Amino acid sequence: MTEVLSAPLVVEFPFTRSLGPVQSAFLTGLRERTVLGVRTADGKVLVPPVEYDPATAEELRDLVEVAATGTVTTWAWNHEPRRGQPLDTPFAWVLVRLDGADTALLHALDAPGPDAVRTGMRVRVRWAAERTGAITDIACFETYEGEGDVNERQAQSHSGEFAGEAVTGIVAPARLDYTYSPGRAQSQYIHALSGRRSVGERCPSCRKVYVPPRGACPTCGVATSEQVEVGPRGTVTTFCIVNIKAKNLDIEVPYVYAHIALDGADLALHARIAGIPYDQVRMGLRVEPVWSETGRFPDHYRPTGEPDADYDTYKELV
């Protein structure tokens, strides 16, 4: 039986965005240990603030300051915190309606266990020691036993201006960790690569050969199982010049990434082109694989020295 392959994969990138006047004031306020909301035309105070009324779509600009204390409206216990979450020990996710607000803010509550958390409990903000103008300036919430009538606390108007420089943009990291299993068809393809062979699968209906194989014909929708060896040479059908260096990728820019139709295949795969100046890569260029040091996959493709392929021989694969 063929070994079932799997591999951990991570997709990660920084998401950079600019802030409008409302979000800018909110994050700048957190840096200054101040929680701001925004008041709607009907007098409701929304925290976190938004730029447009969710009911009427009216633009909102009336900023107000609310208290750093509030009431838990609902909660869920987190037994196993993940990377990047507010606390590295078990905690509760809580929705907290801050005093003076009409909506709830989602954050973490530091509690010894789920028995210590309840709807209606009083909490307050625990500020981070170092604040930069981000939601993480609220390190978490903690229990609060202070006195006072919550119903008497009113949101106070605020200009949204602070002594320090305003926060005008944020960088939010996005990350997805998952385990990928290629399945039968692609596992056979990967095993073949370790023997420096490229194999595809032929559709029993349209007779096209797909590389890499996916176990089914994308056109006909029928299962494929007939293996066909293709290549190793192929033709560049189209390409792009990469000018931005990717993180953790030890390849100097500029370099060329291309779609390559291996001889005998009816689907182009993508790979890097090297062994030729980037500005000399062209459609129709004939190439061959250069294998990695481990020999388990082609590191890149290089020119074979053959005459360029005629456009009519690969135009259906562009």
Image (tube, rainbow, N blue to C red):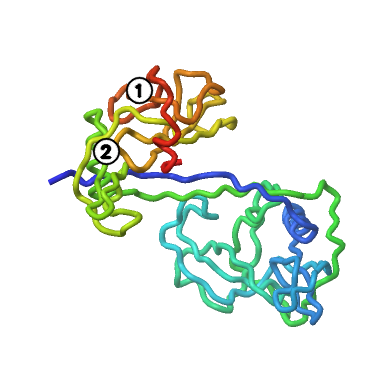
- Neighbour tally class for label 1: few under 14, some 14-19, many 20 plus, Cα within 10 Å: some
Residue type, label 1: Val
* Residue 249 image offset from top left, x and y in percent: 48, 30
Residue in view at x 56 percent, y 23 percent: 279
* Residue 10 image offset from top left, x and y in percent: 43, 44
Determine whether 296 is above or below 120 in the image: above
Residue in view at x 78 percent, y 76 percent: 40
- The numbered mark at residue 34 is none
Depth check, front residue: 178 or 228 = 228
Residue type, label 2: Ile
Label 2 – label 1 distance at C-alpha? 16 Å
Mark 1 = which residue?
290
Mark 2 vs 1, N-terminal side: 2
* Residue 44 image offset from top left, x and y in percent: 76, 78
Please indicate whether residue 211 sits to the left or right of residue 308 in the image. left
Please indicate whether residue 141 sits to the left or right of residue 182 in the image. right
Query: Secondary structure beneath disc 1?
Result: strand
Mark 2 = which residue?
190
Residue in view at x 80 percent, y 80 percent: 43
Depth check, front residue: 36 or 294 = 294
Q: Name the image quarter holding residue 244.
A: top right
Closest to the camera, between mark 2 and mark 1, is 1
Depth check, front residue: 259 or 152 = 259
